[in-house]
Amino acid sequence: EEAEEAEEAEEAEEAEESKEAEEGTQETEETEEAEEATEEAEEAGEAEVAKEEESDAESEASLKEDAAVAFHVHLRVSGDADDVEFKQGDRAELNIMRCDPEGMWTEGEILSEGEKPGMYNVRIWANKVEHQEMPNTPREILRSPTGEESFEAGAKIEVKVSKCLDGGSWVACRIAEVGSEPNIYNIELPDGEDGHQEIRGVHVHSLRRA
């Protein structure tokens, strides 16, 4: 009997050790799985951060690009200055405005055909009376509100014009030469330390004495 009891005790002890070993193995596997899950989560987090940084960089680049083309510079017609005359070398000031490159459509009418095919003399009703007539306006910036393709004198049309973002500002310039037509000048604007930018065909209405 004592031998049997000893054998049973030994078997019970072995069974307990086997159970503990199995539990230890299970705990080890669970720990390893938890560590793997943590590593995967950290990698996923790092990937998400990298993706966000890349997205931020792309957004910043896009904003810079948008800012670079956010507006165009247009000459502003400031009023009646036909009595002002300039000669070559005179210092003057040019009236410019920042304008949205997308533009906007405004109502008008066809007055007649222009000097060249595909051009029309038009009237823009929204302009001041002295600036309503726009000669030789290209077909590309005209459209019919009814969708018709042909333009005849008296036809109602829409003209794509600049949508300007401010009231204009005056910048220093120099008269490079007097134009071949009355009240027209070619001018030079400072561009950097040693350079300049030439603008041709500027009407006197966009200029004033410095």
Image (spheres, helix red, strand yellow):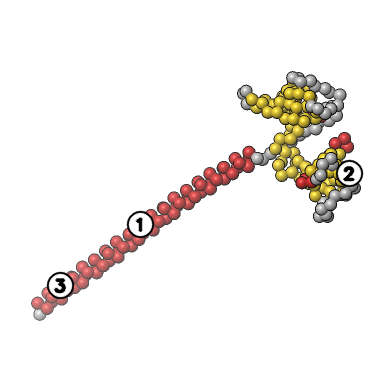
> Which element carries disc 3, helix, strand or loop?
helix
> Which residue is the site of mark 3?
10
10 Å neighbourhood of mark 3: few (<14), some, or many (≥20)? few
Mark 3 touches mark 2? (CB < 8 Å): no
> Which element carries disc 1, helix, strand or loop?
helix
Side of 60 where 205 appears, left or right? right
Above or below residue 110? Residue 186 is above
Residue kind at label 1, given as amino acid type = Glu
> Which one is earlier in the sequence, the residue at label 3 or at label 2?
3
Q: Report the Cα–Cα distance between label 1 and label 3.
A: 37 Å
Q: For residue 84, which quarter of the picture?
A: top right
How many labels sit on residues?
3
| Camera-nearest label, 3 or 2 | 2
Q: Please tell me which residue is depicted at 80% across the width and 45% down the height of the picture.
A: 118
| Camera-nearest label, 1 or 2 | 2
Q: Please tell me which residue is depicted at 62% across the width and 23% down the height of the picture.
A: 194
| Closer-to-camera residue (151/123) | 151
> Which residue is the site of mark 2?
111
> Which residue is the site of mark 1?
35
| Closer-to-camera residue (86/6) | 86
Give percent across and percent down for residue 114. Answer: 84, 42
Q: Report the Cα–Cα distance between label 3 and label 2.
A: 116 Å
